[in-house]
């Protein structure tokens, strides 16, 4: 596969996954997208792990990959949006890295919009629909407040 073929494939492949409740990307996706060696990207994460963990724990997992000698395993960091953003701010800017940064921001934003549901067409919304939306939001807020009240004694006991 030529470098141009790889670049085209890389550009067509999604950067962000929404497998769980939190959209993520991986150190391998960042390495491929920025055309850096994966070991260098992992080293950048490990050298600054305290900074990354300010935005939640960084998960590492072993992932299989095929080689001419058979299947091997490699360590890959699983990064949330804040981790990925921080990682890219620590990289040197060049046209490839800047392009990847923009793609990453677009994909995380698109997943956020998708998770929040379709946009509300405020030009054609009826008063009743608007009241229903507000009522649903208030019901959700009250449920969350009740859950917080229920969990507060447990959290206080844990802190003590």
Image (cartoon, rainbow, N blue to C red):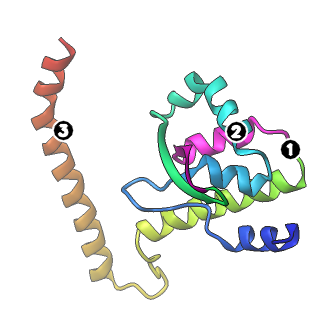
Q: Which residue is mark 1?
A: 93
Q: Residue 157 placed where, x, y %?
A: 13, 18
Instruction: Return the disc, 2 or 1, that comes first in the chain's sequence.
Output: 2
Q: Which dot marks residue 148?
A: 3
C-alpha separation, residue under disc 3 versus residue under disc 2:
42 Å
Decide: marks 3, 1 in contact (CB < 8 A)?
Answer: no
Pointer 3 or 2: first along the chain: 2
Q: Which mark is residue 124?
A: none
105 or 147: nearer the eye? 105
- x, y percent for residue 22: 42, 53
The CA distance from mark 3 to mark 1 is 43 Å
Disc 1, SS: loop
User: Which residue is the extreme one toward the top?
Assistant: 160
Residue 115 lies, in percent from the top left, at 42, 66
- Magenta span of residues: 70-93
The residue singled out by tag 2 in the image is 39
Query: Circle 3 — which element?
Result: helix
């Amino acid at each position: 596969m030529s470098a141009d073929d790889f670049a085209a494939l890389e550009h067509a492949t999604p950067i962000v996954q929404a497998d769980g409740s939190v959209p993520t990307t991986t150190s391998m996706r960042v390495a491929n997208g920025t055309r850096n060696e994966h070991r260098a990207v992992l080293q950048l994460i490990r050298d600054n792990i305290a900074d990354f963990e300010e935005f939640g724990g960084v998960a590492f997992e072993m992932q299989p990959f095929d080689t001419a000698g058979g299947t091997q395993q490699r360590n890959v960091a699983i990064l949330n949006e804040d981790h990925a953003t921080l990682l890219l701010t620590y990289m040197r800017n060049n046209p490839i890295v800047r392009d990847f940064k923009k793609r990453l921001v677009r994909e995380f934003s698109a997943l956020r919009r998708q998770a929040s549901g379709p946009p509300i067409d405020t030009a054609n919304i009826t008063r009743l629909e608007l009241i229903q939306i507000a009522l649903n939001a208030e019901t959700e807020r009250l449920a969350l407040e009740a859950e917080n009240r229920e969990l507060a004694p447990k959290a206080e006991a844990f802190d003590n």
